Image (cartoon, grey):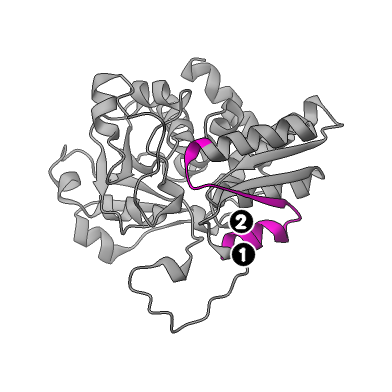
Amino acid sequence: MSSRGAIDFIYKAHERIKPFVHRTPIYTNSTFNNLIGKEAFFKCENLQKTGSFKARGALNNILKLKESNPNLKGVVAYSSGNHGLATAWASRLAEVKCSVVIPKMTSEFKATAIQGYGAEVVTCEYDPISRIEACETIAAKEGYEIIHTSDHDDVIHGQGTIAVELLQEVPDLDAILVSASGGGMISGIAIAAKSINKNIKIFMVEPKGKMAEESLRSGKRLWPNPPQFVDTIADGLMSQQLGNLTFPIICRLVEKDVFTVMVTEAAAGATVAAAMSDKLKQMDPGIKKIGVILCGGNVDMLKLPWYHGTHKMDSRV
């Protein structure tokens, strides 16, 4: 699908989900601007429903399924946490049954929150293939539709609504920094932003070990198989490979320079780290106004490297 055609679906997704999701705020900080020598505009998806941008894509996908099949039996998703939360929330809103497959190592915080939305939680081994197989087994057995974490048009279009809102409020951005796992958010943002302003630059931010820049520059999928997770506390960025659907979009619309951050950066903090990096300072001096996507805020405090176990956490979402 061309970007020109896809932007129409993104605008329709925006109208579809607008009554149910937050139009998240955009914040600025003069101290931060002075530090980086640019104007940064933070799109706060950490304040979104369920605590992350994933609510947009999951809800758009499920509502579209309900439009085409009012008798939708149920949905199932695999997730490291945030997509599971979003799918559970969206399925409750749409009044359909839901199962979520999560790796055994997923925090109790996120597992409990998923169950709090009324979804069934199913655990699997800690590897990408196991969770996909578990998800497909449930879908076949129960007659459920799979809600993909990123590699689906309706999910991509839902995530693209972030850029619609951002550029409505700050239309003269020069660039947007977006963290990426499977690539659904950056694909949707790139489609929307480039359709609105063809000169804007979209930069990917990745955890160390993802190796996206090599693949983007070659236009080929250079990742080893079978798919694996990278070693990062940012569980929203664990997937090493970009999706089969998202990769061509990213190759076409996203800059080949990728910002790689250390493994101790959480998903939302990754874009902040990129904004502060020397790499950005050394780029085109014409990049003066940047959008920074804070993708989520569901951090498990027990997994932070500086946490010493002296505080109890609130498991509410």
* Residue at image coords 29%, 45%: 289
Residue nearest the viewer, comparing 253 with 98: 98
Tell me where residue 180 appears, x and y as whole percent. Answer: 40, 40
Taking the spot 43% from the left edge, 32% from the top edge, the residue there is 193
At 40% across and 43% down in the image, what residue appears? 229
User: Where is residue 270 shown, x and y percent of the image?
Assistant: 33, 52
Which quarter of the figure is the C terminus placed in? bottom right
The answer to which of 117 and 45 lies nearer the viewer is: 117
Query: Which badge, 1 or 2, is on the more N-terminal residue?
Result: 2
In this picture, is 85 found above or below 210? below
Label 2 sits on residue? 50
- Give how far across and how far down residue 235 sits, in percent: 44, 52
- Does residue 295 appear in this view? yes
What amino acid type should be assigned to the residue bearing mark 2? Thr
Q: What residue would you read off at disc 1?
A: 317
Q: Is residue 39 above or below residue 145?
A: below
